[in-house]
């Protein structure tokens, strides 16, 4: 029997790159590294234009509060600190570094000097914090802060190996090629949390990876496979928790409220890398695909590598592109700059022609078919919220639960009317959150 949840969809998976091994691309001539790749405050630069930097050197640190430090992914010289519009539409600063191609390692990069069994909680947390690890499955929440918040409140950890977004095959390839790193990271996180149980969540139809994982599990049952129904959004934290614990997490609640905590497979591998090699999070694996990409595949690149460089290394474009997306087609973000750099949370670069751009082929209209209601894994009424948002009735949309939307994209995907339902609800969420913040600050005055 598979673990499951209410709602969800089964989009065509388009996993054309699932058999493409991860290839390490030659490093680019320059990288542009964002100081805001995580949930929390933007980092402050600790280098200036003209400075020489080494691989793994701290270049941006948290001024205080929640956040993740940022490190150089190449060695070379800082040639700019530029204001940019981020992948998510906000404003940030990027540090631009000219790569000297020497890969000179920073002196601060060295393996953790103790056995894990001898390390204190604070020491483990410091390694993860100083490595700048943020949820690589897309949440971008600082990993050290999640562990600190969960310690003493959870009895188990869920490792998210689900990959329901069409086209994206990063987690699959990492399981097949780097499972020992993922397992080492799981162990470190379990020790930090003081828990004795981990569940590796994966869609039940992924037989090849399930076999590889099963071969690595021991008989003690401490780490167990959790086979999840293969429907989207199987990798959503709220839905994994519901599938395992049968507890619904309402708006504002997290897995910790249900006694567990969720980390992605990529995050676990980054934690292991920080301990065994001392390397901060400066590289990541991405899928490059879409009908415009000449030679799709999975690639490991330095954080800060521009999309245009990566596309060129994939043989360039074979069709006129209409849309470039960072992440999957359901939850990813369309880009307006083909040079947008890869961040800690970029799982894919997808480039599509008209063929995949449904909005350009249809005149959007709601035919009240109700498909979005059946698809919504949060039990919302997307069509009603959409209608209210269109009329500017944000308070009424809030009363219908708009703020609980996880922006999974399922309603947009199933809509035969071609309506960008998720985008309307997402816009309402932004307004609701802004109004709540301003009400909270008024109260504090
Ligand atoms: S309303 Fe939100 S949670 Fe529901 S299907 Fe649409 S995007 Fe997903
Ligand atoms: S799926 Fe689209 S057309 Fe159908 S009710 Fe929802 S918004 Fe309307």
Image: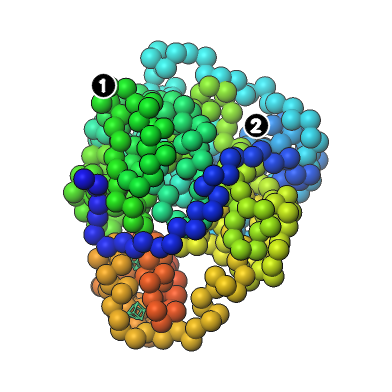
Position above or below: 261 against 112 = below
Please tell me in which quadrant of the rendered image residue 26 appears: top right
Q: How many marks?
A: 2
Could you say where residue 433 lies in the image, as x and y percent from the top left?
A: 38, 64
In terms of image quarters, where does ligand 1 lie? bottom left
Whichever of labels 2 and 1 marks the residue nearer the N terminus, that label is 2
Tell me which residue sits at (43%, 62%) in the image.
Answer: 12
Side (left or right) of 316 relative to 220: right
Q: Dot 2, crowdedness within 10 Å: few (<14), some or many (≥20)?
A: many
Could you say where residue 169 lies in the image, as x and y percent from the top left?
A: 50, 48
Tell me which residue sits at (45%, 46%) in the image.
Answer: 137
Camera-side residue of 9 and 430:
9
Q: Is residue 266 visible?
A: yes
Q: Is residue 270 visible?
A: no
Helix, strand or loop under label 1: loop
- Residue that label 2 marks: 56
- Residue that label 1 marks: 220
């Amino acid at each position: 029997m598979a673990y499951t949840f209410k709602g969800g969809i089964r989009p065509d998976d388009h996993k054309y790159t699932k058999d493409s091994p991860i290839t390490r691309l030659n490093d680019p001539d320059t990288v542009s590294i964002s100081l805001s790749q995580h949930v929390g405050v933007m980092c402050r630069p600790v280098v200036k234009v003209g400075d020489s930097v080494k691989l793994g050197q701290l270049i941006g640190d948290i001024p205080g509060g929640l956040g993740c430090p940022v490190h150089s992914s190449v060695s070379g010289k800082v040639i700019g600190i530029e204001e940019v519009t981020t992948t998510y539409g906000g404003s940030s600063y990027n540090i631009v570094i000219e790569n000297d191609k020497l890969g000179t390692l920073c002196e601060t990069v060295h393996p953790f000097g103790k056995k894990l069994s001898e390390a204190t909680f604070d020491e483990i947390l410091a390694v993860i914090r100083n490595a700048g690890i943020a949820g690589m499955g897309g949440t971008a929440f600082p990993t050290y802060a999640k562990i600190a918040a969960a310690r003493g409140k959870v009895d188990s950890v869920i490792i998210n190996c689900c990959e329901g977004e069409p086209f994206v095959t990063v987690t699959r390839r990492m399981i097949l090629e780097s499972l020992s790193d993922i397992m080492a990271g799981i162990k470190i996180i379990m020790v930090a949390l003081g828990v004795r149980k981990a569940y590796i969540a994966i869609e039940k139809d992924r037989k090849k990876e399930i076999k590889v994982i099963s071969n690595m599990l021991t008989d003690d049952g401490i780490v167990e496979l959790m086979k999840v129904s293969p429907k989207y959004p199987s990798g959503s934290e709220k839905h994994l928790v519901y599938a395992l614990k049968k507890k619904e997490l309402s708006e504002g609640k997290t897995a910790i409220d249900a006694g567990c905590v969720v980390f992605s497979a990529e995050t676990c591998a980054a934690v292991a890398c920080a301990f065994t090699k001392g390397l901060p999070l400066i590289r990541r694996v991405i899928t490059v695909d879409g009908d415009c990409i000449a030679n799709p595949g999975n690639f490991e690149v330095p954080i800060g590598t521009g999309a245009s460089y990566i596309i060129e290394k994939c043989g360039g474009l074979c069709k006129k592109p209409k849309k470039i997306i960072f992440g999957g087609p359901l939850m990813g973000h369309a880009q307006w700059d083909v040079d947008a750099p890869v961040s800690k949370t970029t799982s894919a670069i997808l480039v599509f022609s008209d063929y995949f751009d449904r909005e350009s082929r249809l005149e959007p209209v709601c035919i009240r078919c109700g498909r979005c209601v059946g698809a919504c894994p949060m039990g919302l009424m997307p069509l009603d919220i959409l209608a209210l948002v269109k009329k500017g009735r944000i308070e009424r949309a809030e009363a219908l639960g708009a703020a609980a939307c996880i922006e999974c994209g399922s309603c947009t995907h199933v809509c035969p009317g071609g309506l960008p339902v998720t985008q309307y609800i997402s816009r309402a969420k932004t307004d609701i959150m802004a109004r709540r913040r301003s009400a909270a600050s008024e109260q504090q005055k």
